[in-house]
Amino acid sequence: MGTFDYDLFVIGAGSGGVRAARLAAQRGKRVAIAEEDKVGGTCVIRGCVPKKLFVTASHFPDSFEDAVGFGWRTEGVHFNWSTLVDNVAGDVAWLSSIYIRNLEAAGAEIIHSRAVLEDAHTVRLMAENRCVTAETILIATGGRPRRDLDIAGIDHIITSNEFFHLPKQPKRVLVVGGGFIAVEIASIFAGLGTETTLMHRGNQILRGFDVDVRRTVCAGIERRGVTVLLEEQLSAIEGERGALTAVTHSGASFNVEEVLLAIGRLPNTDGLGLDKAGVEIDPRGAVVVDAYSRTSVDNIYAVGDVTNRLQFTPVAIREGVAFIETVYGDNPMSVDYDNVPVAVFSTPEVGAVGLTEEEARETFPALHIYRASVKPLPYRIAGRDDRMLLKLIVDADTDRLLGCHMVGPEAGELAQLMAIPVKLGITKRDLDSTVALHPTLAEELVTMHTPAETIRRQAAE
Ligand code: NDP
């Protein structure tokens, strides 16, 4: 061991890498972690954290509107984009500094450089043009937004990376994509008053989510001012940023200030020297790992978005923890990817855990579907039309709760809590035996007594 400079070298200081580096250092290992950008990774620097703050900003106009019904006068309220951008950047910088402080306090060495593999134990630090060696290497370089549409004018697009630093609020935008990021950013823009069009190639947004969730979110964002174009694709972008014309396959054109592409993310493996070290990647460029995050090379592991698994911060952190337990804890640990709760911070917000109706239909012969559509109490006075969707999927044979899907205020918070009973495998009877808490929206989860639908798979002919 003594022949290596470090016990562990982590490439990438995002959620997964930082957690692993910190835990290894706390165990007394000699740890270095290299980062070419700001410490914190996608979640802290250009993802979850700034996004949630922008979402909060985008909700104030609704609050001001609603407040009138409750007796408030709100004339003269004014939004300043630069204040939001600057304050969010300040918060992100503060969080990044906390990450640095925690790493240093644990005894990990932070190296501000791009790091690439020279071989299975050697890392080249590009900023310093020197090599170091490590017994174990952890690749945690995350992912980046795709920009690879083969169309004229593609250089004019922005992605979620640039979104948080736009010097001024665009008056009109086109958001391309129908996944998490497209729907969240379209909601933010619309909430803040930007004329927003969302263009998606499929016949409904949010593929992979429950059918009712997809429908409800689409109707909800449209009600909030987003123009949703389905089964449509971008074919060219003309002009310059600030005055762009986006042309579609069907021949329509849009004059917008920005085109934001949110068509998925790619793993950051380009130029990382994986071939030199013999680390296998899949056709998408993601590092191939086993259940313990070990790559095709024995001493090299990978966690987070650089691997082809669920792309969520808490998942990357869990993978980092499991890696430490496996390698340094004499306790081989893999991550359980079942019943991971998810939220889409669109407006209306999505919270979900467990099987969708479509997934459950494939596996279970009989299902009870419970569905509630509730108007949040304050909306009556506020004069707001939106309703909250709460949906439960139950195995009709065993009464087991298989999935819970919600769209509406704080759906993400509810999904985090509902993840516990779904994970524990509780039954619908358990929910029924729980006393409601009134007046809350969540009380609907324990008061849906009659299935809206019972679905039985037809016996094969
Ligand atoms: P997603 O995979 O969620 O969505 C990609 C979207 O782009 C889909 O609607 C897809 O359509 C569409 N698309 C893909 N290729 C093309 C193409 N060539 N032309 C037009 N449209 C295309 O990716 P995101 O970038 O939104 O997010 C990446 C990941 O990051 C998420 O999957 C999630 O794991 C994570 N994330 C999580 C968040 C959260 O937890 N709240 C927030 C943001 C990101 P189709 O459905 O037809 O394939």
Image: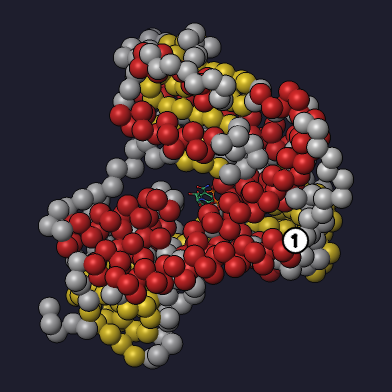
The answer to whether 439 is drawn above or below residue 283 in the figure is: above
The answer to whether 231 is drawn above or below residue 112 in the figure is: above
- In this rendered view, identify the residue nearer to me: 147 or 350: 350
Disc 1 marks a residue whose amino acid type is Trp
The residue located at (47%, 35%) in the rendering is: 415
Residue 345 percent across, percent down from the top left: 58, 44
Report the side of 181 relative to 22 (left or right): right
Report the side of 291 relative to 203 (left or right): left
The answer to whether 84 is drawn above or below residue 425 in the figure is: below
Q: How many residues crowd mark 1 within 10 Å: few (<14), some (14–19), many (20+)?
A: some
The residue located at (79%, 49%) in the rendering is: 193
Q: Quadrant of residue 81?
A: bottom right
Question: Is residue 310 something one can see in this rendering?
Answer: yes
Residue 285 percent across, percent down from the top left: 42, 62
The residue located at (38%, 81%) in the rendering is: 111
Residue lying at the far bottom of the rendered structure: 129
Residue 440 percent across, percent down from the top left: 56, 25
| Quarter of the rendering occupied by the C terminus | top left
Residue lying at the far right of the rendered structure: 75
Q: Quadrant of residue 375?
A: top right
| Disc 1 secondary structure class | helix
Question: Is residue 120 something one can see in this rendering?
Answer: no
- In this rendered view, identify the residue nearer to me: 332 or 81: 81
The answer to whether 272 is drawn above or below residue 144 in the figure is: below
| Quarter of the rendering occupied by the N terminus | bottom left
- In this rendered view, identify the residue nearer to me: 118 or 152: 118
User: Which residue lies under the disc numbered 1?
Assistant: 81
